[in-house]
Image (cartoon, coloured by chain):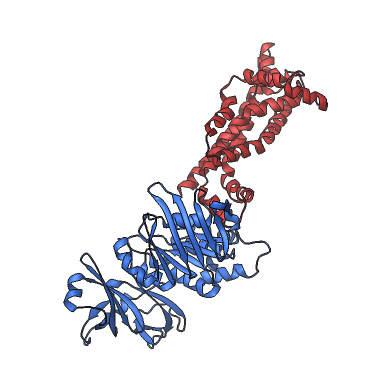
Chain colours: A red, B blue
Amino acid sequence: MTPEDFSVLFLTLRVAALATLLILPFGIAAAYLLTRWRGIGRTFVETLLTLPLVLPPTAVGFLLLELLRGSGPIGRMLDEAGVELLFTWKAVVLATAVMSFPLLVRPALAAFEEVDPRLLGMARSLGSGRATVFVRVALPLAWRGILAGALLAFSRALGEFGATILVAGSIPGRTRTLALAIFQRTQIGQDGAALRLVAVVVVLAFGAVWTTELLTRRRVRRTEA
Amino acid sequence: MIELDVVLPLSRFRLGVKAALSSDTVAVLGPSGSGKTSLLEAIAGLRPKATGRIVIHDEVVMDTRVGVSIPPERRRIGYVPQDACLFPHLDVRGNVRFGMAKAGRSGLFDEAVAILEIAPLLDRFPATLSGGERQRVALARAIATEPRLLLLDEPLAAVDPELKGKILPYLLSVRDAMEIPFLYVTHNAGEARAVAHEALVLRQGAVVFAGAPDEALRSMSLVDPEARFDNILTGTLGAARAPGETGSLQVGEAMFAVPTEDSVRPGHRAVFSVAPDDVLVSTRPLVGISARNVHPGSVISREVSGATAWVRIAAGGLEWTSRLTRSAADELDLAPGHDVWIAVKTHAFRRLR
């Protein structure tokens, strides 16, 4: 591993971790609210939240670019606030966050669905308000699923390419993550160097997905008991 | 004083319960699927679709006509559902403490643990408890919140009722120690008599009887095929004078021979159950009979349902329910006021606690 390899690795890990932390509160909130929501429109919102999973990442990147560019609705606000986002590491975080969101929400949603709603009613009857019920009952009973989702989202963030390259480019040392670096190295014929990064990303992803599997497997066993 | 006027659409029928309950101890009877559990959940505030009016001790808990419905967390109603509904991620201690206010009455936790006899269970998790233990923990959890009303849903016992798991004796203790008003759902009209001053019989979501539990027995045998009419006796245990002798139970003035157990503690309160099939009735004085409990008495009432006759008898200072065949009741001419003798075998007394 060269110093450049390490710098790419650390940038990737940092970006993926930040993206996961960024979506965690929103993902948990979205999943919990969706489980409690019995009205019409629920399926629509669920579909909308899942969309980044199936859309071409470049399409998502393009939409983000349109929103964030100087003339776009959010870009103008960012400009006025003096925040530079596009083609910085922050844009990488944002792009990977959006792309990873469904992978957090779906397992979290399944985990919350598994919590017996009567336990939530019982907690309320025992004097807890809605927020307390969430913290003391729903969250502790669903944490495995949420953690599994967070790990999946993190794995997805490690490999994000299409949306990132559109909103953040591939600037060495600033926005060039593992996926982008692998692509760039194969383009200039450095296959050996690309292979080192491929090995790194395989090990990382394997570890994250394996942990996810272990978490979900143990949950199944506990439900059967 | 509890005023109920609850309407709740269910999948099979519409629950519509209207009752003014004047006593603080109420038994709710009725066959499976008559809406008893739904009624309790509506009172606890766990059925958002319920409409109507609920007043508990002059406080309006719900009055949907004027847009009032206090959320469940502020109703201060302790609910013990059939399956106990304990929090699986908390041990028994955590479950009992769950609803206790941080600034609540100190000692309440200890009191709840003592009354329900769950001290040995405190570090265990719900998954490792028996059904009866879960119910006790759930009842402890409910009373630890200092509720102004308790709602208890007794699980319908399987074919062989798990007597040891019965919540009834503990409910008796809670009633006597804490004076919390309660609604107790049961299939056992005998339990209703033992624990409540008032009974409500539901059928298809409607009240078919409201009044004294004794009178509820009449409609029960017609309404609920699963109903039980166990005779519940609460008394003081006496010592077995010598090994091999039976124990004794003093209920008021009367003494009964009961099975000796390893754990007999003389002077302690005990609750026994005698099935109505185990109460024999004779119109002549009984001599030369193996049953140890023979008492003179008189017939109070007789209800006939199909080939079965339910006979109520006052004997030994208590009221008994006996189930006979209709032909036997006819042959003996068991009409109200007639003198009879009852005989109950020692081993027909089954200890609940």
Could you tell me if residue B243 is visible in this image? no
Identity of the residue drawn at 54% across and 61% down? B55
Q: Position of residue B77 (x, y in %)?
A: 55, 61
Residue reaching furthest top? A188
Q: Residue at x 75, y 25 (%)?
A: A89
Q: Could you tell whether A164 is left or right of A80 in the image?
A: left
Residue B309 sits above or below residue B75 on the image: below
Regarding residue B39, the answer to whether it shows in the image is yes
How far from the left and from the top, in percent, is residue A219? 52, 44
Q: Which corner quadrant holds the N terminus of chain A?
A: top right
Res A29 quadrant in image:
top right
In-front residue for pair B45/B315: B45
Q: Is residue B219 above or below residue A29?
A: below
**Residue nearer the viewer, A40 or B173:** A40
Residue B75 sits in which quadrant? bottom right
Query: Which residue is more in the foreground, B127 or B271?
Result: B271
Residue sitting at x 21%, y 70%:
B325
Q: Is residue B47 above or below residue B219?
A: above
Q: Is residue B31 left or right of residue A16?
A: left
Tell how many labels: 0
Q: Position of residue B330 (x, y in %)?
A: 18, 74
Q: Quadrant of residue B223?
A: bottom left
- Please name the residue shown 70% across and 21% down the image: A67
Position in image of residue A3 (x %, y %)? 76, 24
